Amino acid sequence: MAEMTMVEALNHALRQEMERDESVVVLGEDVGEVGGVFRVTDGLVDEFGEDRVVDTPVAEAVIVGASLGMAVNGLRPICEMQFSGFSYHAMHQIENHVARFRWRTRGRFPAPMVIRMPYGAGVRALEHHSESREVFFSHIPGLKVVIPSGPRLARSLLVSAIRDPDPVIFMEPKLLYRQFREEVPEDEEAHPLGESRVAREGSDLTVVAWGAMLPRTVEVAEEIAEEEGIEVEVVDLLTVSPLDSKPFTESVRKTGRAAVVHEAQRSWGPGGEIVARIMEDSFWYLEAPIQRITAPDVPVPFFAREEAYLPDKDRIRKGFRAALEA
Amino acid sequence: MPREEMEVAPPLEYLSILDEEGDLDQELEPDLDEEELVQMYRTMLRARRFDKLLLEWQRGGRIGTFAPVSGQEASQIGAMSAARDEDWFVPSFREIAAFLWRGGDPVDMTLYNAGWNEGVAIPEDARDFPISIPVASQLPLATGLAYAIRLRGEDDVAMTFFGDGATSEGDFHEALNFAGTFQLPVVFVCQNNQWAISVPRERQTASETLAQKGLAYGIPGIQVDGNDILAVRVAADEAVKRARAGDGPTLVECVTYRLKVHTTADDPSRYRDEEEVERWKERDPIPRFRRYLEKKGILDEGEADEMTDSVEEELGGVWEEAEERIETLGGPDVMFQHVYADLPPHLERQRKWFGTDEEENDNG
């Protein structure tokens, strides 16, 4: 066991998978010698060589499109979009090919590949570096969209993503990259894709969160438990798509109240889908309107105002209050 | 049925006028107004000095990540000075020197770097685009400006800047092809600064030059010594003239060097030798141009030193002024401004909710 940051845990997963399976290759901008701008691929080129750890030209479309070609022809590519804001340069490859190659070829050519991308606000980054666009990808059938909430799960989810038979968009909340450490076991650990988890048990309110919003949501839950004896159950999605609604459905049927916390903008955001699932599956169990605690429907402001943009503990608490009191 | 060589494109030229010692090829020397030459030099000094200040402020936590310009002043000012004020300036993210040439306010640029959207408010009369971070994404925009120029029967030009890494992006190829096809008045200024973060120029493309990429799209290309401001200016003058005359776009490759970090989030010691940086420092565009101005008798040593001092003095108060401006800026609800021409009702509700104790889910 070692204490690792999320960056180190992801690096650990990549290293172990590359050791285990020689068909695993890593490609992207600056993933080689510098080990990625966040150092997630640190040291891999020294260990596995330039043929398996490829510093590419600055060209996201070919990074993704070529990864698909590699995947079809026997490799397991893990490509990196330097920031999620640059993945749009490759959106046509993702939408038109990657997501549906299995479907288009009637199962002949599946595309087992991972597209990693740091995303999200809160680190004083430049414009186009802070968006939370999980719905762009979640809306496309054929893709899996995974977002870890801590180092240990980041590692075990990335392992599963690499081994998955389908393309996975692996979104890394960069606010959590170095925010805290967790014990990560040396032995293999693979959290299944498509399985969300109860991060904190409670009986009064169900809250769904993921990524960088998860730790602060749990913190607020702990605080109000201590202060007011209200027990909030927090469900950590982990896989945004395909959505595993079982844990939050069971939870809502128990608590009768629900809220969703996400840093993506509010309208047409991921919360809409989660709320709809609750309405479809658990409407008769509800005692109050469901609350969405989200970013407003504006572009992420430059960083001087990003803290005001992101749901903070105060807004999360207000949302809880609304869900509990209504 | 022959199999023979085809002449598909004119040969590519390389241009250098002023060498590292400040010595000159007089035949190639452009005939520029002395006052303008001094202005060009002064702007180079301002850019270098401002870069240094920004770096200090970044290291001190006053501003966020930024991309220093040091080493590329000749490429930017040489090119930008060939354009008129009414021409369009379409930058990427390292164009501090070009911004200053355009009359950009260092206080605004400081606000931008300190994370305030107000810093990129474009003055009413300026034809400047905001900083563009996604690599090469600004090139198609310049192409569209140029299409409108042509359709509206104007004789303006759009000048866009980017780096060597940008030539790998689809947007670069799409923009050049479009501009070539419609013979649009665009000047594509590639600052080949040898490094795209950690990837060296020779790993970016197998092309011998970047300038030749224009030829494939029917666009004249020229490679110039990008640390020689006279050479850049001559190449840009020709490109602007061609565009203004309706004879289409040009790709100018300025061979230069990024003397500092890619951005302040980067550590170049991980991928490049200090020796290489030292070699390029000897080719620094600023002392070279100063020697030229001194040899021409346009500036004497005392005047040149005095100018350095006056630039320092001019920029000395920028941070304080920026701080004062920041004090006057609005609160979080500024983020709701300019999202649409008219704020839709749901956004109006969200704006009102901001900074109040009301619950968020009041959907009205």
Image (spheres, rainbow, N blue to C red):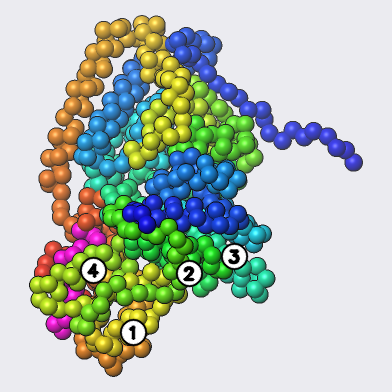
At 31% from the left and 48% from the top, the residue drawn is A125
Give the image location of residue B39, x and y in percent: 32, 21
**Residue to which mark 1 is pinned:** A249
Image coords of residue A145 (percent x, y) = 44, 67
Quarter of the image where one finds residue B208: top right
Q: Are marks 2 and 3 on the same chain?
A: yes
Camera-side mark, 4 or 1: 4
Mark 4 vs mark 3, CA separation in Å: 36 Å
What's the CA distance linking mark 1 and mark 2?
A: 21 Å
Residue A144: give its label: 2
> Subunit of mark 3?
A
Indicate the amino acid at tag 1. Answer: Thr
Q: Which residue is mark 3?
A: A111
Query: The disc labelled 4 sits on which kind of residue?
Result: Val
**Kind of residue indicated by mark 2:** Lys
Quadrant for the N terminus of chain B, please: top right
